[in-house]
Amino acid sequence: MRILVIFLVTLGLIACSEQQPESVSDNAPLSSSPTVVEQIEQAEAAGKDYVFASPLDQIAADYVRLALLFGHLDANYVDAYHGP
């Protein structure tokens, strides 16, 4: 049991260390492929509709647009839930 605890603590310290792998630089992009936002903007610029991977993606995009629109129209609008 003691060895397991030591192993887990050591693993946690390694995972939380601030060292980055040598192959990752601070300025390098993680992926060269365009983001979803860029893909939507490219489709809209070309006059085409962007086809989402799933219906839930379309609903989420519509919700974000609506929330941003409300934020511009009503400065007191807050998209948050503070439940019991």
Image (cartoon, rainbow, N blue to C red):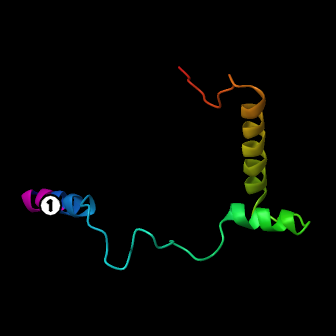
- Quadrant containing the N terminus is bottom left
**Residue 43 as seen in the image, left or right of residue 64:** right
Q: Which residue reaches farthest front?
A: 27
Residue range highlighted in magenta: 2-7
Residue at image coords 23%, 58%: 12
Residue at image coords 26%, 58%: 16
Residue 46 image offset from top left, x and y in percent: 88, 69
Residue at image coords 70%, 25%: 75
Q: Is residue 61 above or below residue 38?
A: above
Residue 52 visible, this orientation: no
Residue 51 image offset from top left, x and y in percent: 82, 65
Q: Main secondary structure of the magenta part?
A: helix
**Residue 26 image-quadrant placement:** bottom left
Residue at image coords 79%, 47%: 62
**Residue 82 as seen in the image, left or right of residue 48:** left
Q: Please name whichever residue, 47 or 54, is drawn nearer the observer in this view of the structure.
A: 47
Residue 16 visible, this orientation: yes
Residue under numbered circle 1: 4
Q: Please name whichever residue, 54 or 78, is drawn nearer the observer in this view of the structure.
A: 78
**Residue 73 as seen in the image, left or right of residue 5:** right
